[in-house]
Image: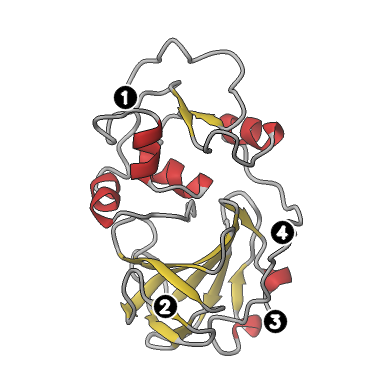
Amino acid sequence: MNTQTAYPSKLKTLLLAAAVSVLAACAGTSSTATGPVPEGHYRVQSGDNLYRIGLRFGQSAQTLATWNNLSDPTKIEVGQVLRVRPKGGSGSASTSARASAGAPARETTVAPTNRLTLQWPVDNGSANVITPYNGGSNKGIDIGGEAGTPVKSAAAGKVLYAGEGLRGYGKLILISHNSSTLTAYAHNQSISVQKDQTVQAGQVIGTMGDTDADRVKLHFEVRINGKAVNPMPYLN
């Protein structure tokens, strides 16, 4: 499963971008198709769209459209260089370079000062991990289980997104826990929270299912500063 996930914001823009989630970036290249990518920027790859790029860097599609003066967020070109961080924002040149090359993320330890301890989103989840994080084809972990099993928020936070507008994730919930950390819960059978709702740690947010998946499972991700990290060290 291709798990590229995180930070949608304005629902209207999200749905517009998600509707073209498999739309390859326009054919041809721009004048910026070669050369180094400045820090805080990203070079559009084949198959990208603004929404997926936003997930990768922790920004909404609408924010990226505004920063890059895009009148139509569904039209970006392969090779086009886009600003993905605010001016003066965080993000290392090496991170930008890896992202621009489309290379799989390496399994590194990310330790922000406001790091959270997360609880398992499914009871007995630690005993039912069927696909581990690998930083490449799987940006999180897959937890097996039965349809209808409660899915719980891994920590207190605010719902950023609840819906099924992103192909490959089925019914998806994204929760922001602080300024740098969010969690993602995919393939739900049902969703019991809505965008902008405040949730508590352990609160039921949905039920396990197999929406847009080959079996019943919960795909769970942890993103820090827009980067997928191995959830296991954060789960308690």
The tag on residue 26 is 1
* Residue 212 vertical placement versus 154 (above, below): above
- What residue did someone put label 3 on? 236
Q: How is the image coloured?
A: secondary structure
Question: Within 10 Å of the Cα at label 2, are there few (<14), some (14-19), or many (20+) other Cα atoms?
Answer: some
| Quadrant of the image containing the C terminus | bottom right
Q: Could you say where residue 197 lies in the image, as x and y percent from the top left? A: 36, 75
| Mark nearer the viewer, 2 or 3 | 2
Is residue 214 among what the camera can see? no
* Residue 8 vertical placement versus 80 (above, below): below
Q: Which kind of residue does numbered mark 4 sit on?
A: Pro
The tag on residue 112 is 4
Q: Which kind of residue does numbered mark 1 sit on?
A: Cys
* Residue 46 vertical placement versus 29 (above, below): below
- Label 3's element? loop
- Label 2's element? strand
